[in-house]
Image (tube, rainbow, N blue to C red):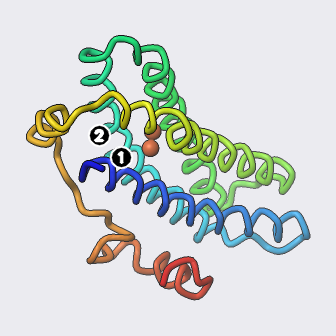
Amino acid sequence: MSTIMSQLHLDHLNLSRLLEVLKDKLVSLKEGERPDYQLILDVVTYIVDYADAHHHPLEDQIYDYATQQYPSSKQALLEVEAEHKLIRDNTREFQQLIESILMDSVVSMDVFNQRLEDFIRQQYDHLNQEEGTVFPLLEKLMQDKDWLNLQVKLQTREDPLFGDNVAEEYKRLYKSLIQQEAVA
Ligand SMILES: [Fe+2]
Ligand SMILES: [Fe+2]
C-alpha cells in the first residue's frame, strides 16, 4: 500500500477513536449525565483543524487525480468529494453551537443530543464509505506511477493530536483520551 494511503487509513483509525469517545458521551448524556462541552468542543475543533483542513483536501487531490486518469471512478469519487463540503459546513456549525453554549446560550438537552448524534452518524457514514468502497476502488485502479506522481504534489502535515508531538491546544484532549484509554 502506498505511503499516502497508509496515512489516510491511520487518520481514519484515529478519527474513529474520537467518534467512539463521542458515542460513549452520547450514551451517558442520554442517561442524564452533565455534558462535558469542553471535551466535545476539543474533539470537534480537532476535526475542523485536521480532518476538514488537511485530511479531506488531501483526499480531494487524490480523487481529482483518479477521476482524470480513471474516468470510470468519477461518480463514486465526486460523491465523497461533495460530502467533504457538507461535512465541513456541518462541523463548523456544530463547533459554533458548542462555543455558544460555553458562552451561556441555552440549548435544550434534546436538541444538543440530536445534533451530536447526527454529527457522529455523518462522520461514520463518510468513513465507512471511504474504507468500504472508495479506498478499495483506488487500490484497484491506481498504479505505482500514480502514487509517485501524486507524492510530489501532496503536502504532508503532522497530526497535531495523534502525531509525535501533541500541539499545545490539544494537550487537554490528549490527556482525557489517555484517561479514557482511547490512546495508548
Ligand atoms: Fe473523506
Ligand atoms: Fe477520509
Location of residue 145 (image quadrant): top left
Residue on which the image places disc 2: 58
The residue that label 1 is drawn on is 55
Q: Is residue 108 above or below residue 162?
A: above
Residue 179: where, in percent of width, then height?
58, 88
Which amino acid, mark 1?
Answer: His
Compute the Cα span from label 1 to label 2.
Answer: 5 Å
Would residue 92 appear left or right of 120 to someone viewing this image?
Answer: left
**Farthest residue toward the bottom?**
179
Q: Quadrant of ligand 1?
A: top left
Residue drawn at (57%, 56%), measured in percent from left and top?
99
7 lies above or below 85 = below
For the residue carrying disc 2, how many other residues have a C-alpha within 10 Å: few (<14), some (14-19), or many (20+)?
some
Q: Are marks 1 and 2 in contact (CB under 8 Å)?
A: yes
Percent position (x, y) of residue 88? 48, 37
Residue at position x 62%, y 83% in the image: 180
SS category of the residue bearing label 2: helix
Tell me: residue 45, above or below residue 171: above
What percent of the width, then of the height, locates residue 78?
44, 19
The kind of residue on which mark 2 rests is Leu
* Residue at x 66% of width, y 63% of height: 22
Q: Is mark 1 within 8 Å of ligand 2?
A: yes
Who is closer to the viewer here, 146 or 77?
A: 146
